[in-house]
Image: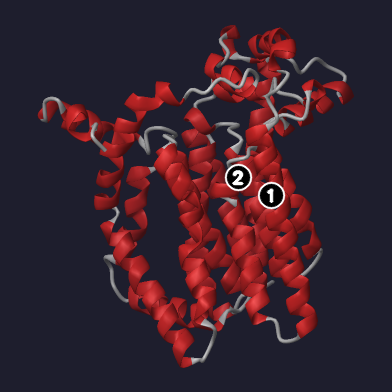
Amino acid sequence: MNKVKKDYIAVLGVFGLIVFFTSCQWRVRSYNTTMLALDYKNGFTSRALLGTIYHILDGILPFDMICYPAAFVFALIMTLLFLVLILFFAHACLKRADSKLSDAIQILLLMFIAVSMSTFSGGYNFLRVDIFMLAVSMLGALCIISKKAEFLVIPMSAIGVMFHQGYVFMYFNIILVLLVARFIDAQNNRDKIRYGVYFAFSFLVGSVLFLYFELFSRNSGEEVYETVVAEAEALSYNGIYHTTLLAHEVLGIDLGDTEKGLRLVNRIQFPIYILVMIPFIVFFIIMFAGIFSEAKRAQANRFKYLCILVGPLTMLPDFLLKVDYGRWVMSVVAYYFVVLLALLAMRDAPVESVMARLNVKLSARLWSYMLLAYPVFFLPYWDVDICEAMRSANRWLADVIPHLYRYVEWW
């Protein structure tokens, strides 16, 4: 890698730190500290991998970590390590991609780090398990890009689901789609079999663990509930832990009926978000139309690009059944950033051709720089509320249109 690209990685790192310090609210919310109280010593339960890692560190390190200050430092370190992972990912993409596309890749990386670091640095997502799920998929993408230790995607699939079974819907698609791309592009039967096996076992492992955690992992919660509550109190700011999280994850109580009002918030905010994102949706449609056209011209397998296009449909159950639309939108956005960057690093010809053409066209138009700055108004992503702008729009509409929530309740 030449000096210019190394300098860009350094600049990207500084930019990531600036975004972190700008976005961080210097407090870990009760939901995320309470998650640290879940541990496999109380049974092989869902969402307990992060807490298990935390308890292992507590046993190794010479100081007590079952307290809020330690949880805060842990959140700080994990977020900065995630920034380091992004820089490694950026290095791999710039090193392997066509040098003629460096400008386009650098822009994508800059936007990706703005989205991810702002989202995971503060508010409801500081130390949220989502950062670990995305990190697992990025590590899997790095293995696939480099063609080194690609078999690790199988245990990574398990690790992602062990952090949170929602991984199957949110970030698992990154690994699966890139394996499909490698399978289709394979030039010999040996490679096709290898990537087919990686895909099949990754999918099987992820699916089995998902079903186990959803159906069988909360049978003995009452026996350990008081212990988990005591640790959650010690780990949380002012001892205020997240009661509904423990009720659901430890006792297995279904909380779906308590989310009715939150669903109405989602039904108001999401159409508004789609409306304000029209400039990017148009750009996205043009880009994929070009990719399919290039694939046809090059006689490439267009099924691969169809899989890439519809990969985020794995998120559909969450959009239909769950309420954290900020997290769901973040997972869709992160998917396209990571997959497109990975395809450029893998020297995918149709994607390279389209990105090069778009880069030339946009560079010649001054307004294109405004297009890059536009998403900043809608960052960072939150959880139930998509972002601050959408929450403000929701409140404004509720004031202007009386009984707004009644109008959307029939959905």
Q: How many marks?
A: 2
| CB contact under 8 Å: marks 1 and 2 | yes
Q: Residue at x 67, y 17 (%)?
A: 69
Image side of residue 224 versus residue 352, left or right = right
Q: Is residue 123 above or below residue 232?
A: below
Mark 1 nearby-residue class (10 Å; few <14, some 14–19, many ≥20)? many
Disc 2 residue type (three-letter) = Tyr
Most foreground residue, 224 or 37:
224
Image side of residue 300 versus residue 390, left or right = right
The residue pinned by badge 2 equals: 167
Most foreground residue, 27 or 278:
278
Q: Residue 323 appears in which quarter of the rendering? A: top left
**Where is residue 309 drawn, in percent x and y?**
46, 67
Determine if residue 24 is in view: no
Mark 1 to mark 2 CA distance (whole Å) = 9 Å
Q: Which mark is residue 206?
A: 1
Q: Residue 202 appears in which quarter of the rendering? A: bottom right
